[in-house]
């Protein structure tokens, strides 16, 4: 059995050096015991790092490094060994990280995801109080992280509060900034941190600057904000006001992006897409691989809105590439509509599914999820400004019109969207794929193509 010691719970570099040597020496993961620090008296006790020579190296896909950097900050004591196993398997199967059905990949990703959330919470919920010491004002905050994120987050606070002297106290570690240098100290208790109101001027510039409207789950924020942080936040009373302002600020973000770049809608679209990648407005982001944003020319005259990404789209991060998307492409071609000139997107940007064995079975988004995700489609449409928007299926119609629409009654004619734009409604291609009777499928497909032809004629 090989015993490997790394210096600290968050010592990613130590783990990387050690695991590099282990992999090159072909030491199997189940023959390694990982320990942290001196570990005296603990199961994980042992010596220093494996001492792998820096010159002995092999390349690892960048996504693994990013994943491991976060996952290693988790508290699960198996994380070092799990990452070692993942690394060994990755060397034989370079695309392993894309296999979302793999239990190890999913477990390690769940570590990384939880850590990312904790990092964000620390940035959002730390509150400084002013104290006076021999050198004048010092700002002190108390925070209780779930994971080993304090060192990883230190640079963020240095950057934000470079000109202040501050300390952040946590149960395991304290970090201190004297305006020039960052130092560490032992853990503290809440009693070590000053009580009283946080410094008004500090939080106004800090909290207001990190309050990201695109991440606000309107109506749920007060309910979902972790209560353990409330006690550090006397300004909680101001949150309803911030929420009330959020949607206005969201629209301003898009407008600002457009203005900043001199009306360049490409850059505005990229900024919006980037923002959507971190969306947590509803719970669907938790299990999906990624946000699947819209695609196509940002000055398209025609926008098609589907329901949500499917299994293949979720993995690839691209809309309309699965079986339904392929049927859609074929139908567009038969209708004489140039696929390259249309923009395609979905009403809901994360894949909702049920896990059955190794399979992920599509699950229909509910009204709350459609409503939460509507903001993104509204912003996409505000940027693209299509001449005609087409709802493919009931979910898309509900998103665009804000109410239930009956496809059979509403298809085949133009409608007006709440913002005045022209919209059409037709079936979703996946409906055609689900029809068991070939004759019925053939007939419905012909109707779908006829709808697309009529829509195509509306475009200048
Ligand atoms: S489904 Fe939409 S609202 Fe929900 S997390 Fe994903 S992008 Fe955000």
Image (cartoon, rainbow, N blue to C red):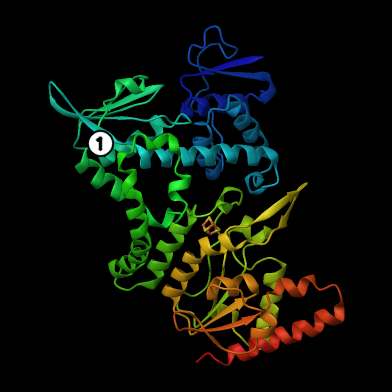
Tell me the residue that label 1 is attached to: 198
> x, y percentage for residue 204?
24, 46
What residue lies at 34% left-to-right and 44% top-to-bottom? 236
Horizontal side of 191 relative to 399 (left or right) equals left
Q: Is residue 130 above or below residue 266?
A: above
Q: Quadrant of residue 56?
A: top right
Assign a secondary structure to mark 1: loop
How many tags in the picture?
1
> x, y percentage for residue 273?
46, 62
Horizontal side of 155 relative to 321 (left or right) equals left
Q: Residue furthest front?
A: 237
Q: Is residue 275 above or below residue 120?
A: below
> x, y percentage for residue 374?
51, 66
Q: Is residue 277 above or below residue 410?
A: above
231 or 266: nearer the eye?
231
Circle 1 Cα neighbour tier, 10 Å, few/some/many (<14 / 14–19 / ≥20):
many
What residue lies at 40% left-to-right and 33% top-to-bottom? 152
Horizontal side of 216 relative to 234 (left or right) equals right
Disc 1 beta carbon < 8 A from ligand 1? no
What residue lies at 43% left-to-right and 53% top-to-bottom? 215
Horizontal side of 184 relative to 311 (left or right) equals left
Q: Quadrant of the N terminus?
A: top right
383 or 11: nearer the eye?
383
> x, y percentage for residue 365?
63, 61
Q: Is residue 299 above or below residue 266?
A: below
């Amino acid at each position: 059995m090989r015993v490997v010691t790394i210096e600290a719970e968050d010592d990613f570099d130590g783990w990387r050096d050690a695991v590099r040597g282990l992999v090159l020496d072909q030491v199997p993961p189940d023959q390694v015991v990982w320990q942290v620090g001196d570990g005296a008296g603990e199961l994980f006790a042992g010596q220093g790092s494996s001492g792998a020579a820096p010159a002995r190296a092999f390349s690892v896909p960048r996504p693994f490094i990013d994943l491991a950097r976060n996952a290693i900050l988790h508290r699960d004591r198996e994380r070092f060994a799990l990452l070692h196993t993942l690394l060994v398997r990755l060397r034989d199967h370079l695309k392993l990280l894309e296999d979302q059905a793999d239990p190890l990949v999913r477990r390690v990703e769940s570590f990384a995801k939880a850590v990312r959330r904790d990092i964000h919470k620390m940035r959002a919920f730390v509150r400084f109080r002013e104290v006076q010491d021999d050198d004048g004002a010092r700002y002190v905050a108390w925070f209780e992280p779930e994971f080993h994120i304090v060192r990883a987050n230190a640079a963020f606070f240095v950057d934000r509060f470079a000109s202040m002297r501050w300390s952040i106290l946590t149960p395991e570690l304290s970090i201190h900034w004297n305006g020039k240098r960052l130092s560490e100290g032992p853990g503290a208790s809440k009693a070590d941190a000053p009580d009283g109101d946080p410094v008004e001027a500090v939080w106004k510039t800090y909290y207001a600057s990190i309050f990201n409207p695109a991440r606000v789950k309107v109506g749920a924020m007060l309910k979902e904000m972790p209560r353990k942080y409330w006690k550090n936040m006397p300004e909680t009373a101001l949150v309803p006001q911030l929420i009330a302002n959020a949607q206005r600020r969201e629209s301003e973000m898009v407008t600002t992006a457009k203005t900043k770049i001199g009306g360049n809608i490409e850059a505005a679209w990229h900024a919006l897409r980037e923002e959507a990648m971190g969306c947590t407005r509803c719970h669907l982001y938790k299990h999906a691989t990624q946000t699947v944003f819209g695609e196509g020319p940002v000055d398209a005259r025609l926008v098609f809105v589907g329901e949500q990404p499917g299994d293949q789209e979720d993995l690839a991060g691209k809309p309309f590439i699965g079986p339904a998307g392929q049927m859609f492409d074929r139908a567009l071609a038969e209708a004489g509509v140039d696929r390259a000139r249309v923009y395609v997107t979905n009403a809901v940007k994360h894949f909702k599914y049920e896990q059955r064995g190794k399979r992920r079975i599509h699950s229909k988004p509910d009204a709350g999820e459609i409503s939460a995700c509507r903001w993104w489609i509204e912003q996409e449409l505000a940027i693209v400004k299509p001449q005609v928007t087409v709802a493919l299926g009931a979910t898309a119609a509900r998103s665009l019109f804000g109410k239930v629409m009956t496809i059979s009654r509403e298809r085949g004619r133009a409608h007006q969207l709440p913002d005045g734009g022209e919209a059409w409604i037709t079936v979703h291609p996946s409906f055609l794929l689900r029809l068991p009777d070939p004759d019925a499928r053939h007939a419905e497909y012909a109707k779908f193509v006829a709808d697309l032809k009529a829509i195509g004629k509306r475009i200048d």
